[in-house]
Image: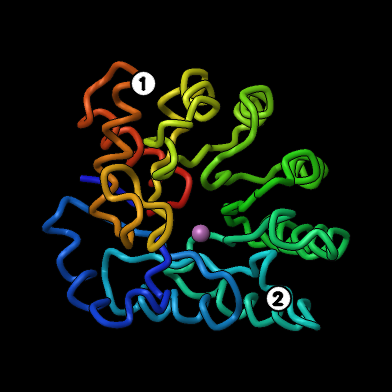
Amino acid sequence: MFIDTHAHYDDEAFDEDRQELLRDLPSKGIDRIIVPGCDVSSSQAAVALAEKYRYVYAACGIHPENLTDDPYADISEIVKLLEHPKCVAIGEIGLDYYWDKSRKEEQKAVFGAQLDLALKAELPVIIHDREAHADSFDVISARPGLKGVFHCYSGSAEMAAKLLKMGWYLGFDGPVTYKNAKKTVEVLEICPLERILIETDSPYLSPLPMRGKRNDSSNLIYIAEKIAAIKGVTIEEIAQRTAENASALFGI
Ligand code: NI
């Protein structure tokens, strides 16, 4: 049985068949799922899904691509959601310099404010770091005591080694199955089994052979298969170890 620690089932890509899809996932080997929010409304939607399905959990947070004119008002809405018993993390939060380089300082401030919230609430964090590795590392390093995962880790093996030493988990998604995954393979080679999480980022990032199609948690098997080959273990071991890791980090 697998745990998908990152799937956006509130996304409109699932509007037509969300109910059937989520209902059938346990019969496809998916044991638990974390749905991370990216703004106030998607965080509320994640909590609503967690209320509806026993095996769905929510994370709540403001994604760097979704900064409004008043992100701190949005954060105070997120604070209310953190009280929910099925809200197990703050996320996805972080820095994204790929889409928007113009608000770097504001992104860092909003990211930092949510990390402070995580420390106060004693919750793990789910981090989005796109083309912002050095700054992401600086912002988290300034706050010892944090725990969490770098979702769809895309940094260097050197930075991975530092993060692992600091107790962080690394999340691996569909791109690990792509032909150009050389850097991610290097990271997996140094990442011990007890720090690997597997995620789909559904509806995005479909692994081979589903690339180009809408992604869902049943495709975790392809990610697990590739990681098993890199680590020289069975798919069952990857399923078991990553599920244990998700349970340990998120308390699910
Ligand atoms: Ni995501």
The amino acid type of the residue labelled 2 equals: Ile
Q: Residues within 10 Å of mark 1 (few under 14, many from 20)?
A: few
Above or below for 119 versus 39: above
Farthest residue toward the top?
232
The one of 82 and 24 positioned closer to us in this rendering: 24
The residue carrying mark 1 is 230
State the SS at label 1.
helix
Is residue 194 or residue 92 the one in the foreground?
A: 92
Residue at the (26%, 44%) spot, across then down: 209
Indicate left or right for 111 with 209 as reference. right
Q: Position of residue 173 (x, y in %)?
A: 42, 44
Assign a secondary structure to mark 2. Answer: helix
Q: Give the residue type that dot 1 points to.
A: Ile
Q: What residue sits 60% from the left and 33% below the top?
A: 167
Which quarter of the image is occupied by the C terminus?
bottom left
Residue 49 seen in the figure: yes
Q: Assign the N terminus to one quadrant of the image.
A: top left
Q: Which residue is painted at 48% across and 68% down in the image?
A: 87
Looking at the picture, does residue 87 appear above or below residue 51?
A: above
Q: Is label 2 in contact with label 1 (beta carbons under 8 Å)? A: no
Specify which label sits upstream in the sequence, 2 or 1. 2
The label nearer to you, 2 versus 1, is 1
Any part of residue 95 in sight = no
Between the residue at mark 2 and the residue at mark 1, the CA separation in whole angstroms equals 40 Å
* Image quadrant in which you'd find residue 91: bottom right
Crowd class of label 2 (few under 14; some 14 to 19; many from 20; radius 10 Å): many
Q: Which residue in the protein does label 2 denote? A: 75
Q: Ligand 1 closer than 8 Å to the CB at disc 2? A: no
From the viewer's perspective, tell me whether residue 235 is left or right of residue 64: left
Where does the image place residue 154, in percent across and percent down from the top left? 59, 38
